[in-house]
Image (tube, rainbow, N blue to C red):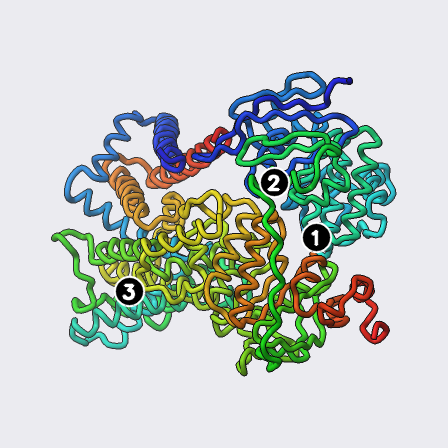
Amino acid sequence: MAQPLVMMSSIRKQFGPVLANDDVSVTVNAGEVLALLGENGAGKSTLMKILYGFYAADAGTIRISGQPVSFSSPREAMAAGIGMVFQQFSLIPALSVLENLLAALPDAPWLQPRGSTKVRAALRWLTRLAPEIDPNRAVRTLSVGERQLVELAKVLNLDARVVILDEPTSVLTPAETERLYGFIKTLTSEGKAVVLITHKLADIAACADHIVVMRGGKIVDEAPARDRTPGSLVEAMVGRGVAGSLPPPSSPPTDVPLLQVRGLSADIQGRKIRDVSFELAPGEILGIAGVSGNGQFTLAESLAGLVPALAGDVVLDGVSIASRVEDGAISGDVAYVPERPLDNAVVADLDLALNLALRDVRQLDFFPDRKAAFRRAHELISRYDIRPPQPTLAASALSGGNLQKLVIARELSGRVRLVIACYPTMGLDVLATQAVYREMFRQATEDACVVWISEELDDLLSYAHRIAVIHAGEIMGITRREAADRRTLGRWMAGHAMIEAA
Amino acid sequence: MSAAGSIRIIAIVGGSAAFLIGASIFLAAIGRPPLATLSQMVLYAFGDSYSLSESLVKATPILLCALAVILPARLGLITVGGEGQLYFGALTGTAVVIALPAAPMVVLLPAMLLAGAIGGGAWSGIAGLLRARCNVNETISTLLMNYVAVLLVNYVIYGAWKDPASLGWPATMMFPPAAIVPSVFGTRAHVGLIVGIAAAVVLHISVTHTRWGIALRVLAGNRKVAAMAGFSFVKQTLLVMALGGALAGFAGICETSAIQGRLQAGISVGYGLTGFLVAWLSGQNFLRAIPIAILIGGLIAAGDALQLYSKIPSASATIMQGLLFVAALGASGLAGRGTARHG
């Protein structure tokens, strides 16, 4: 067998008291997809960030094509052919796609004449990957999925031989995911190695050649993909039997609406929603499906009353909760789990205790009781399994999944009447996802309305009472779960309105 | 030791060393024995009770102006308007004295000080309002308003408020004794110093231990999340700008009353800007600003004394002050960078 492309041996990395990687060895072969599987915080991303030169290992060696290397920065790793696409992207939102790609080239030109060789070089992967993205569009107008493709093109432009993808499918629509799988296969057929950090079994089934399962910083299982069943992988990942899937929440007891949304229109920097209307009974869960970037963010923000409604109203139990921007906090009856928690739900440089207390921070004493805040934080952190469990840590030190758990703990642990959850399980593993669903459904059984924006169509079809589809800021149709079928929902997602289907 | 702690120590030691070397080179270049002159400066700054009191006199407006920078900085705002707020506070405070020259001290003194603080607060509050409502950059607006305030003071002392008895010298009448801020410890140091130190302590406790401090930190960290929690950026911007401006305005009327005895040109020798630098040296920390302000006050006082007794041009004190700032800021920057690299 040929020399392995990358060999990492006995890698060890400690962050304060946390041992993120404990004597980990992996081998990456050219032309192969290595799947790194594990729960949030298992040490997958840390291991790959060491390979990428982002962190220095405390112990262990890295060999590339047999040569020992030691990277002190991602720049050096890139020069050696290692490229990584992060969960949090490093694109500059204000610049265009082309400018972002040009800026990442090692010899980025000062002048950028159209059609020059540089421009062609910058665009060569993007045109293969996503020919429909106009390179002159500003990155901030792209959906998350499109941004990921641009990020991937950026890495490939640097002639990476090893492409590391960190949870790539957690932000993609089903169609985009399929396309990414196809693309991963193309890359390996061209002799590149792909490392896929994931906790989704679907990713493994679709394209993994070799699987490494990590838990608590150690490798707990390693095998060729064909030798493992999904069940055994989940067992290795979570270290216990597969937790049974949740029972679907029972139907709401009454039809009398608690939440009424009437003709709601809003606009956040061009991301519009138009004339959205629906009613929810207490205990009812409305799933909102749709391709990301179709107004979900604006819908969630305007339901929460954080952006002014241009028209229409949101009435919760007879009281208008729309447009509370100037007159104070989000209503105490509303729990809001926004997308991208780092931007929208936490203060990165404040500690966990304070971030967990933000929901009712205005009710604190003028001299807040710190001990009480830390007690409460300890309790929530252990109940929601937030890692590392240190209330004094800044929120910026948490991984994406743990940040999401933090927001869930803050928003859903109390009693509310309306839950607005925007991609609440993005970046979470199986167990954490189930825990989030359990909290959401508990709120529903306690008679709260739940508006659940998601791209996990299977989950919506299993658990939501009704499913609405949003496209270009408008509701294309609403159906009961029992009456829903994937084809109709798919047509709605593509922008065909309800009339044709009905 | 924490990383921040070791950075600070490296910065202090390195900055002092760099300053001593720079100052020695400068003194040698103008033909003065460096070591002797430097030790003489220490004596002139803190050597006896008179020098100490002069240093404290200089430190007072610097400290108050530094606080006026640190408080908005806690909300992420950068203001450079201490000078203008100081002048405008002097102007409004003096207006009270001009209007009620014969009022008894119990009325005149508090009214004058309050008017000075309100004037400074209003001047700064304008910039705060522009920032909060119209998103006008507060650094630019405070900078430009400095010129307006200084020229407004010139306008009244050359015009309507000029004292006919001063024989053409542009100044108002002398303040009556009822409008003179009392001095403390039998020196020239005045009540402003006590107020400055007390304000620093109260503000420090407020921003670290109260709900208000949490509001400022949340607003500075993530405006979006702050809005969800119900903290108003508009309200807090106005509050910190007005409170900061009030402290600088208070410094202005204290200088006018206790030091000059009347409103005239040059009540401040760049105290606003010096306060800004002190704020940055302190790392936007209220308590650390106190010793730094006193140190800088000492340097300025020693410069004056050197000019008087050793015939060294007064500009050399300003040059050394500049050297000190560059050395301290440079050292803390380098120390922070070095530690971040290897941490």
User: Residue A420, percent across and down?
Assistant: 58, 66
Q: Pick the residue in front: B279 or A333.
A: A333
Q: CA distance from mark 3 to mark 2?
A: 96 Å
Residue B284 in view (yes/no): yes
Callout 2 and callout 1 share a chain = yes
For label 1, the residue is A144
Residue type at numbered disc 1: Val
Residue A235's disc is: 2
SS of the residue under disc 3:
loop
Horizontal placement of B110 versus A320: left or right?
A: left
Residue type at numbered disc 2: Glu
The residue positioned 22% from the left and 67% from the top of the image is B175
Callout 3 and callout 1 share a chain = no
Q: Quick check: A75 above or below B219?
A: above
SS of the residue under disc 2:
helix
Residue type at numbered disc 3: Leu
The residue positioned 74% from the left and 67% from the top of the image is A469
Q: Quick check: B154 above or below A502?
A: above
Label 3 Cα crowd, 10 Å radius (few <14 / some 14-19 / many 20+): few
Horizontal placement of A59 versus A272: left or right?
A: left
Q: Which chain contains the residue that carries disc 2?
A: A
For label 3, the residue is B167
The residue positioned 79% from the left and 47% from the top of the image is A178
Residue B323 in view (yes/no): no
Q: Pick the residue in front: B125 or A120.
A: A120
Horizontal placement of A37 versus A112: left or right?
A: left
